[in-house]
Amino acid sequence: MRRARYGIVAMALVAIVSLASSSGAQERGVIALDEDIQGLGVTTRVLMIGAHPDDEDTQLLTWLSRGEHIETAYLSLTRGDGGQNLIGNELGEALGAIRTEELLAARRVDGGRQYFTRAYDFGFSKSADEAFSHWPRDSILRDVVAVVRQFKPHVIISMFSGTPRDGHGHHQVAGILAKEAYEVAGDTVRFPAGADGAWTPRKFYRGRYFDPENATLRMNVGAYNPRLGRSYAEIASISRSQHKSQAFGSLQQKGVRWRGITLEDSRSGTTADSSIYSGLRRGWLGLRGLVPRADAALERIDRQVKLLDGIDYLREPALALPPLWAIHGELVRLETTQERVTAGAINGSSDGAGTAVSAGERELQAAVSVALDRVVRAITDASGTAIEAEVPRELVAAGDSIPLTITLYNRGGAPLRVGLPAVGACTSHSPT
């Protein structure tokens, strides 16, 4: 085992170190490697929207994230501050903190991302009008739009209908704002574009958790994954059981289990809806033509992704490293090029021709960002690399500096070359 230690003053390096740690599901070794490699060819993103922690359809979310390898996220309008607590005395803001952590724990199991708005859970509400009397409608809608623009989903799934049949007023509001955000996230007049730019989702679905028989699209979320040793529904039960303050312990039920969604609106150019992918650009080759100067790089990435299919990385993970590094290099070059285009558009330089970044460029940026996270995790798992960061105290004042010790462990068989980014000041350089 090789080990290298460095003392770093700048806290900015923490962001670089955290990139190498797994932010997806809580698998390790070849299983985590396999999931990230399987996801390298998937460029689709889906956002699910509900009102509270535990409103998400965990089985559908797990099937999307870990079955289809779609980058999936759940947006909860609130943090559950006004709910019950069956494991302690904490209520209000303290309970909101607990339920936030429960949602984050659930996402570590099912592999999704987690977002919130500023809406405070004030308890049960009888109607959307009552909820809006406590929540500034434009402010909460602005938050939802901001998440849509940041995550850039091709598909939005609302867990609620936005009608009185949802019962709870918060649920009704979640259904209403989900559709409004779908409609206005690309409107830079009503909501001026910030750093993330405008975004126009392609499809809008309503969840059919309570009446799957009326869905226009159904998925068997009980499908078994032999590599994971569980079905997606079983994995979802583990995720659901993280809502401990709500006593949501869930049995890991086996067998066929259906989840349904109903297509309510589509900008995909097709009325056929045979799958969630219908009418969407898929994979790296599907992105060709959006930014013509990137087409050659997209084709090279696609070839390397396909090359991984013929490599027995489950037996010898290090065999995957050459194509993974090749993909990483292509993605970094694409990211750097797109950053220059964005900066040029903002500053009016020749690179950006003084115009706004195009929808195609934003689409490419989002795909590259997700793929970079995945390929870095895959390289980390394939190489057997582990990184630890330590600081001497738990508190630091704003504007102050603190020593940070980075320990890099090479536990694999491939040689490892360590390089430091040009950030901060290196106080020592003594490999041990």
Image (cartoon, rainbow, N blue to C red):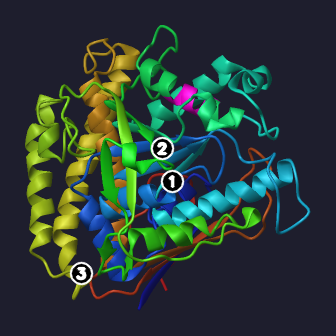
State yes or no: residue 177 in magenta: yes
State the residue in front, 325 or 259.
259
The image position of residue 236, as x and y in percent, is 49, 67
Q: Which of marks 3 and 2 is nearer the N terminus?
A: 2
Q: Which residue is drawn at 52% across and 27% down?
A: 145
| Three-letter code, disc 2 | Met
Cα distance between the residues tagged 3 and 2: 36 Å
| Three-letter code, disc 3 | Ala
Q: Which of marks 2 and 1 is nearer the N terminus?
A: 2
Cα distance between the residues tagged 1 and 3: 36 Å
Depth check, mark 3 against mark 2: the one in front is 2
Q: Give the range drawn in magenta.
A: 173-178
Left or right for 78, reference 354: right
State the residue in front, 28 or 300.
28
Q: Name the residue under label 3.
A: 318
Left or right for 196, reference 81: left
